[in-house]
Image (cartoon, rainbow, N blue to C red):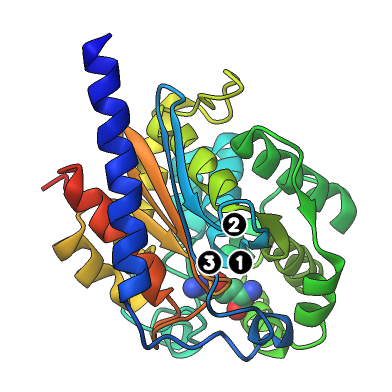
Amino acid sequence: MAEDAKSVSTYADAVRAGMDAGLAASGGMNADYIPYLASIDPNLMSVAIVTAGGEVHKAGDHDYGFAIESISKVFTLALVMDAIGPDEVRDKIGDSPTGLPFNSVMALELNNDKPLSPLVNAGAIATVSLVPGESADDCFGKILACQSAFAGRPLTMSDEINTSEQSTNFHNRAIAWLLFSAGTCYSDPMRAVDVYTRQCSTLVSTLDLATMGSTLAAGGVNPLSGKRVIKEAYVHHVLAEMMMEGLYTGSGDWAYTVGLPGKSGVGGGVLAIAPGKLAIAAFSPGLDPAGNSVRGQAAVKAAALSLGLNLF
Ligand code: DON
């Protein structure tokens, strides 16, 4: 009993430390290449922790629904890994950081049009192209069901965000055609971009995100619903990809200072996983030049440090 009480107060302190550090950080700018994201209140800020045992701690605007964006790449990777196995994922997409921005065409040019990482846009579009399904609706239905299983509740796509992205995603369409020309897009390329864009437009709260992460921390079983979402044997492959490329060109700094598999999205979300223990999620819209939330990184980093979670 006493031990439970102590651990609860420790997690609550970590969430508070995350909020304080996040609010003290400044300098980020909302993403502006997606019109919807440019319009979000930059002062929104929240932190949540969900443990592998299902304890929940949260603070700030933790119920606010924001665009999952690139954090969706993690869960579609899990879905495809479950469908075709890690060897095929590695062979068809790759397992290495690109060292270049998340939407880099040069990264493709330098690597014979192989995406290298499923967590950059090229690799995520290729990953989506491997989701089994007869149509875009069919594939997206599987992705949304997977995201919802990770979150432990039915998630929804925002039509407003999707419309905003579908009408401005020309760069991603170019990437998909480059992949297709090299044989590394495994469905119709415009269908793959359509579904990829929809998967980025799902609304999540910080609490949803922490729950999704806690499912990976718990070896693939959602600790709130008790349901298995991904084979345990594949979870460490997903975490390895997150460690290498989860924060793009910020991944080295993240590994050096936080030491946990992480993932960011241009919607302002940041997620980190402490395997076997918990997930920390934070949200605030202002981004650094690599596309990672400035306050979100500061918050997750402070919470992780206060709990001594660095793996290294
Ligand atoms: O494809 C895009 O550019 C966006 N839908 C997602 C990019 C993203 O979130 C990068 N992460 N920080």
- Asked whether, in this view, residue 256 is left or right of residue 188, the answer is left
Mark 3 vs ligand 1: CB under 8 Å? no
Which numbered disc, 3 or 2, marks the residue that appears first in the sequence? Answer: 2
User: SS of the residue at dot 1?
Assistant: helix
Callout 2: 10 Å neighbours few (<14), some, many (20+)? many
Q: Are marks 1 and 2 in contact (CB under 8 Å)?
A: yes
The residue pinned by badge 2 equals: 72
Whole-number angstrom distance, CA of label 3 to CA of label 2: 12 Å
**Figure check: 10 above or below 126:** above
- Asked whether, in this view, residue 77 is left or right of residue 274, the answer is right
Badge number at residue 194 = none
The residue pinned by badge 1 equals: 69
Taking the image in four quarters, ligand 1 sits in the one at bottom right
Rendering quarter of residue 148: top right
| Direction top: furthest residue | 1
The residue pinned by badge 3 equals: 123
**Figure check: 104 above or below 186:** below
Residue at the spot 59% in from the left edge and 57% down from the top edge: 72
* Amino acid type of the residue tagged 2 in the rendering: Ser
Residue 210 spot, x, y in % from top left? 49, 44
| Res 214 seen here | yes
| Res 274 seen here | no
**Figure check: 129 above or below 107:** above
* Amino acid type of the residue tagged 1 in the rendering: Glu
- Of 235 and 258, nearer the camera is 258
User: SS of the residue at dot 3?
Assistant: helix
Residue at the spot 44% in from the left edge and 43% down from the top edge: 87
* Amino acid type of the residue tagged 3 in the rendering: Gly
Residue 177 spot, x, y in % from top left? 69, 82
Residue at the spot 20% in from the left edge and 71% down from the top edge: 253
